Image (cartoon, coloured by chain):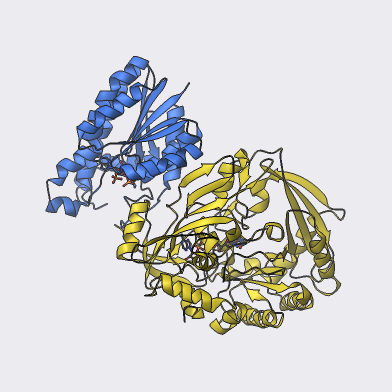
Amino acid sequence: MTQTWIILGATSSMARAYAREMAEAGATLVLAARDIDEARRMVPDLTARGAAEASAMRFDARDPSTFGPIVDRVEAEPGEINVAVFVGSMPSQAEIDADPGLIERVTLDNFTGPAQFLARVMPVMEARASGTVVGVSSVAGDRGRIGNYVYGAAKAGFSTYLSGLRNRLTRAGGHVVTVKPGFTDTSMTWGVEGMFLVASPEKVARDIARAVKKRRNVIYTPGFWWVIMTIIKLVPERIFKKLSI
Amino acid sequence: MQWKTADYAGWGRVHKAHGELARPERAADLARIMEDTPAPALGMRRSYNDSLLNDGGRAIDMTRMDKILSFDAATGVVEVEAGVQLGELLRLFAPKGWLPAVVPGTGFPTVGGAIAHDIHGKNHHALGSFGQHVTSVTLLQPGGKRVTASPGRNKALFRATMGGIGQTGVILSAKLQMISTPGTGMRVKETRVGDFDEFLDLLDNSRFDYNVGWIDGTAKGSNLGRGILEEAELTTGVEARKGPSLPVPIDLPGFALSAPTVRLFNAAYWRKVPARGRTHVMPIASHVFPLDKLHDWNRLYGKRGFHQFQCVVPVDAAPVLKDIVGRIAHSGLCSPLAVIKRMGPGRAGMLSFPMEGYTLAIDFPARDKAVRLIHELEAMTIEAGGRLYLGKDALATGDTIKAMYPEWQDWAAEAARADPDGVLITDMVRRLELRG
Ligand SMILES: Cc1cc2nc3c(=O)[nH]c(=O)nc-3n(C[C@H](O)[C@H](O)[C@H](O)COP(=O)(O)OP(=O)(O)OC[C@H]3O[C@@H](n4cnc5c(N)ncnc54)[C@H](O)[C@@H]3O)c2cc1C
Ligand SMILES: NC(=O)c1ccc[n+]([C@@H]2O[C@H](COP(=O)([O-])OP(=O)(O)OC[C@H]3O[C@@H](n4cnc5c(N)ncnc54)[C@H](OP(=O)(O)O)[C@@H]3O)[C@@H](O)[C@H]2O)c1
């Protein structure tokens, strides 16, 4: 059966690696991105790698008027419709403290914008009784930390939203995979201090592809982050509040 | 965050740099950098030396600029961003019947790096150097100017860019004419070779498209120059598999590659090929990229790193090459990695390495004794009328290199035109005073 993937935030480092995985599997790709020029440059790369078809469309998580055309476009595609959400932004906590208005924009980019888009494709996916939503959240959403808690809160919100969405889509025969990457070597983290055990975007993309195939619910990628986060979640709040990890 | 402070090095890890690196992922970001803060480019850091370093300055890591921009399945012409790796092109296109015309001994190098050193492969005698299969190249020059050069247009710039060690601008993209292949396999014939003279004889008379010789750099006397000749041709019949690569997790202690270990290893390696020879069929990558399964194998040489000496000498200077091999055998400093190849005349640029003759490449752990030996070998190379490879040399002086590359002044003039303020100058260019 033909499969179509809408990639939200297609120009992200991780998204590009995932789009390549899907291209090699022969999928049809809709590259939804704010940087439309770059998304267009991705088209020949993905067709050379085996995509049945690839096209670029404008998508801005902060501008719902960009959502409708994408939904209309995929409705015209036969077969299974899938969505992978890579959109996200992570200003430093210091930037946010200097401009609290950023809190709303971080929430829009990481959670409420993509959620509004998903709300609009859901009926299409339910009608076809198939398809997978991949939502890229983050280990940062597992616990609020001093250096990153607005981004963390947005990701926590997104994770919770995805869990509810899974509950809904499962009934219709579809599926939702929540992806929690650890530190990944992308443009978002280039030059950020204090990174360790950094994974390549290709590794993350392979893990996501495997999780989709196996219908996993929640994955940590690389897998060892599950251990790290389990320990971090176990630290009692009265101790955690004094730590700066 | 555009610039990141980092310590980095070439493959041999002898020269090191501390400086700021940007790693653009989009054409627009790269263009902005070249407009505002132009800097030299680097690829996968597979050059052994300081050719990719800019100590105390800035450099642009091109490895994420790796898209395929167009591919014509009928002609085998592919246009790519400069950061794409040659092994990736092979993996993607061999199943479609095409492969890069020239690949080096590892699949990691980028197209930008392959152009900047006008690299050669095991088929140099048949198909020439990498740059001879580049049909056009697009450069971003300091200030943001975008220029396209080809063998027919901006000719001098093109010849200064092939093998031009990144000094004519950052290579944004290139068009490559690939060669057709009947399949994804290679038929490899291995032959035991008894000594140096027999080696040259076999290399001269090989009828295969790909050939390379492994030489036992520890064998002396009547065994001097013994080794294994590997001749190969493209074929059908095997699927390339995506195997895991094994990391070298630690820097090995210095004695791991000491003289007795290497002697034992080499003797065993030589004997593994039966006296009557043998033939295998294997995936292309397994033959052309033999060490790529062992990731970061440069750590085998320990923290102090290593040098690779690579020279080419004209055919009639074969006796000097024999002396070079003899000198190395007597030094007791050779590592297991020693390679000899017959080269054709093919070269694409003013600073290209190849010349018709024989090339020899040998690794040495970075020790004072080895440095003295390499200086002796340089002198012997000059005597032979040969030259050293700028992708490997880490020790020569400017005078030595300039004498070997008679077109260097024409090249320097083109580089000055492209980069009048010298913002693309790297540590190697400074060491060799190549830009005057
Ligand atoms: C195991 C091994 C085997 C090898 N075998 C061979 C062989 O058989 N034949 C051979 O010829 N070489 C061989 N090499 C050397 C290697 O092919 C070259 O050094 C090649 O240039 C490395 O490419 P890179 O992408 O790693 O570039 P780097 O080493 O990072 O950079 C090399 C040069 O290219 C310039 N450069 C890189 N990208 C750009 C760009 N986009 N625009 C402008 N300039 C750029 C840099 O400034 C630098 O001067 C081998 C190396 C190794 C480690
Ligand atoms: N890198 C890590 O260590 C890490 C760890 C855990 C989770 N993550 C998550 O992984 C995802 C992918 O990020 P990445 O690491 O690959 O970094 P990235 O390259 O910076 O990707 C982020 C992408 O989000 C897009 N984006 C941001 N706001 C948008 C908006 N309003 N509308 C449309 N697109 C918008 C960006 O688009 P532009 O191209 O237009 O800027 C960019 O392509 C993100 O959700 C991130 O939070 C990353």
Instruction: Find residue A82 and report its horizontal and vertical position in percent.
Output: 37, 27
Q: Quadrant of ligand 2?
A: top left
Question: Closest to the observer: A9 or A141?
Answer: A9
Q: Is residue A172 visible?
A: no
* B278 horizontally vs A117: left or right: right
Question: Closest to the observer: B303 or A74?
Answer: A74
Which quadrant would residue B382 be assigned to in this image?
bottom right
Could you tell me which residue is drawn at 71 percent across and 78 percent down? B331
Could you tell me which residue is drawn at 56 percent across and 84 percent down? B399
* B12 horizontally vs B53: left or right: right
Count the numbered circles shown: 0
Which quadrant would residue B358 be assigned to in this image?
bottom right
Instruction: Find residue A113 and report its horizontal and vertical position in percent.
Output: 22, 34
Residue B263 versus residue B180 in the image, above or below: below
Instruction: Find residue B64 and report its horizontal and vertical position in percent.
Output: 42, 52
Instruction: Find residue B47 and report its horizontal and vertical position in percent.
Output: 54, 65
Could you tell me which residue is drawn at 57 percent across and 80 percent down? B402
Residue B307 versus residue B397 in the image, above or below: above
**Which chain is painted in yellow?**
B
Question: Closest to the observer: A91 or B428?
Answer: B428
Q: Is residue A110 visible?
A: yes
Look at chain A in the picture and name its colour. blue
Which quadrant would residue A63 be assigned to in this image?
top left
